[in-house]
Amino acid sequence: MTSSPQIFRLAVAYSGGRDSTALLHATLVTARSLGVVVVALHVNHRLSAHANDWERHCRHQCERWVADGMPVSFAAVRLRSQPQPGDSIEAWARRERYAALKRLAQRHGAEVVLLAHHRRDQAETLILQALRSAGVAGLSGMPRTIERDGLRWARPWLDKPRSVIEAYVQAWGLAYIDDDSNSDDRYARNRLRHRVWPALEQAFPDAESAFAAAATWAQQATACLDEVAVDDLSTFAGDEGLTLNGLQALSVARRVNALRAWLRRQTGAAPPATLITRLNDELFGDGAASWSLAGGLLRRYRGHLTWHLSAHSIDMAVMPEVTLCIRRAGAYRLPGWGGCLRVMRVKEGGVPLAWLAQVELRERSGGERFQAGIGRPARSLKKQFQSAELPAWQRSGPLVYSGGQLVFVPGLGIDARVIGLPGQPQVSMHWEPSESA
């Protein structure tokens, strides 16, 4: 019995505008001869009074193409959220649009999502980023292809001038919609497009291609900087955090580059330039210190920099607690650590309550050993975390010691060497970060 061949599914972001209409049509013409199934993804932002009409236009256009034998299906989603007061509508719409496109593509089994950005879009992006004082990564503009969230996002027309797309639409007589917000000068891209670009192009006819080429050079420079950061971080970044001595030994330029890459690795987003500047000035002082970042907390402690998620409720003036008295079961809130230590009565497998009358709370410093079970060898925390496949964000919180003996490790539990005997009052412990405390 032979299995049927797997059908390759391709998605196209389809707003109904000129560019996405042209890209979707061109994709369908090619897909029909290759046996590829295409799904048109439409995001209704609900920002315009015409949004529902645009959705209907896109749906009906796809139905007409299906009647003509084109291999296309239509999928739409209406955003439920709305921009909050003070939000940039452009930034909000972009963020929500990409999140919606990702969900739609995954729901329909697409492996690739095509986006209709062209060379003019790339040039405008570079100019806008420069006006925002962006660094090299920002000046890179939009990548031609990128792997993200298990999907490949591609912009096949990124090196094509806008005039070529306009000619394609005219040649095929394609119907498309005009978004009324494109003429609203409250938006930065529209101001650039209507007020600045005509004069710029008149003075410098090759401006579009020149800016797009500059973005390409910036992309290459960014890739090089990323490689340097990977090499640097491999020597002084680990499960314990960022070793400050190693970071300080670098030149200022490499130090800033490595710090930016490490913070992006921790939080999943590029850190603010103002924070990078501040950290470069303040990071290598004495004692403990902390900085707020991305809903979490950066901590300098015992020569390491760590980032802890869900620390938005931490009092920034509170340093990590170093001792704790545990005499009964209950919740012990530790604002300096950004969470709560829950102590629960158990009949077996716990630590004797008498051990906990005066405990020490410590950060990981390296070299700690934890015994995961009776009769099993004590191994380094790093190996224990790896064996348990525990992600870095679940390893935060204080190590609990009694009389110099490690008692409890967040994410791993009670060290087997301190488990009590039958008949002793015993407790187990569980660490909860602030968000769930």
Image: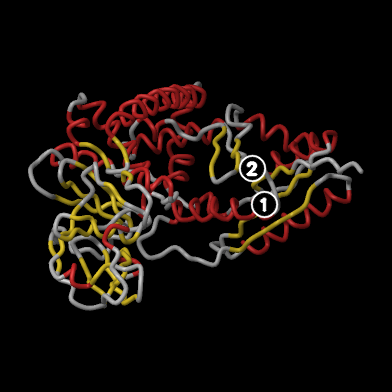
Under tag 1, what secondary structure? strand
**Mark 1 belongs to which amino acid?**
Leu
**Up/down of 170 relative to 297, above or below:** above
Residue that appears at 35% across and 47% down: 377
Quarter of the image where one finds residue 154: top right
173 left or right of 15?
Answer: right
- The residues tagged by marks 2 and 1 sit, at their Cα atoms, a distance apart of 9 Å
Give the left or right position of residue 43, taking residue 263 as reference: right
Pick the front one: 351 or 36: 351
Horizontal relation, residue 134 to residue 360: left or right = right
Amino acid at circle 2: Val
Question: Callout 1: few (<14), some (14-19), or many (20+) C-alpha neighbours within 10 Å?
Answer: many
- Circle 2 is placed at which residue position? 113
Residue 26 visible here: yes
User: Which quarter of the image is occupied by the C terminus?
Assistant: bottom left
Mark 2 lies on a secondary structure that is strand
Depth order, front residue of 329/269: 329
Disc ID at residue 41: 1
Q: Position of residue 412 (x, y in %)?
A: 36, 57
Upstream in sequence: badge 2 or badge 1? 1
Q: Nearer the viewer, mark 2 or mark 1?
A: 2
Side of 119 where 188 appears, left or right: left
